[in-house]
Image (cartoon, rainbow, N blue to C red):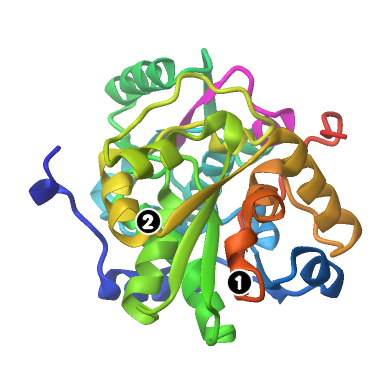
Amino acid sequence: MTEMKIRIPGRNDIVDAAKRIAPYAKKTPVRTCRTLNEICEMELYFKCENQQRVGAFKFRGASNAVFSLTDEEAARGVATHSSGNHAQALALAAKIRDIPAYIVMPENAPNVKVDAVKGYGASITFCAPTLSARESTLVEAVRETSATFIHPYDNPRIIAGQATAALELLREVPNLDVLMAPVGGGGLLSGTALAARHFRPELRVIAGEPANADDARRSLKSGELVFSNNPQTIADGLRTSLSDRTFHIIRNNVEDILTASENAIARAMRLLWERAKILVEPSAAVPLGALLENGENYRKLRIGMILSGGNVDLDRLPW
């Protein structure tokens, strides 16, 4: 895919997405925590997407994509591959619009997310935990059903929907220095970066990524797209690699990607639970973990952070 063919959401796409999803998505709260501010030596503002419907920001993009479909497209249903949060989000958005949803999930997806997808009435097909297996299984599902494929992150309507979380945060806390999100496939980070570009262009945008799955950081540093192959990290939502589209957006709009070790992710998650009373999943704790471990260049700054989700398997806590 060449840069000339990559569809990048614009300012109007983000504004339209915010209007389109308003009847369905929650306007999530922004929280602060004096103890975490003191530990990090920063002023942190947490956008609590763990309190979004389905427990994750993914509902924003999924509902924007589903409610953008024509009636003819919607009647055939929607399909995707996802480790969990996008699967839940698409399943619920499809249920609200009363259309079928066909979901391909890796066999190691957390039980809490599998159960939620089933609860929303979607049809699940399991596959091996690799991107190639996800994609080949999805192709077969689409062939059999004629459903519209809604990619978890490589989709302009998904990205525009995810951007609405940052848009809300910027409206509530207008004088931030830095905007931060986790990065896996890059849908949330791309939307966050585009929201900053279109509504606060002077804002610095950074990301947090597991050190064990740091393909986005390596891609940004090298200027070339780097792929990971089944990385092992407790941040299960961040095991995917960037697409051409998300890499293009991130390369042009993100200042840096900081990494967090597995221990730092677990520590950050526990701090958010115990000190801030915010229940997050490991993927959502990665940006805080990255600041705890590698945030020395961001001391004393006002940082807005998207806490991406709170779907935790309580039988598999990392401590």
Q: Label 1: which residue?
A: 303
In the foreground, 119 or 40: 40
In this rendering, is residue 228 above or below 156? Answer: above
Which element carries disc 2, helix, strand or loop?
helix
Q: Is residue 312 visible?
A: no
Q: Residue at x 77, y 71 (%)?
A: 37
Identify the residue shown where x is 70% and y is 72%.
42
Residue 98 covered by magenta stretch: no
Residue type pointed to by label 2: Ile
What span is in magenta?
101-115
Q: Nearer the viewer, residue 246 or 76?
A: 246
Query: Measured from the top left, where is residue 48 in percent x and y?
Result: 67, 65
- For the point 42% across and 50% down, the residue is 187
**Sequence-first tag of 1 and 2:** 2
Q: Disc 1, disc 2: CB below 8 Å?
A: no
Q: Is residue 157 left or right of residue 301?
A: left
Q: Position of residue 233 (x, y in %)?
A: 64, 29
Amino acid bearing label 1: Ile
Q: Is the N terminus in the top left, top right, bottom left or bottom right quadrant?
A: top left
Q: Tell me the quadrant of the picture where the C terminus can be found.
A: top right
Name which residue lies at 59% across and 35% down.
211
Q: Up-down: is 40 above or below 311?
A: below
Q: Position of residue 135 (x, y in %)?
A: 36, 22
Left or right side of 147 for 86: right
Secondary structure found at label 1: strand
Q: Which residue is mark 2?
A: 159
* Residue 196 image point, x, y percent: 40, 72
174 and 61: which is toward the camera: 174
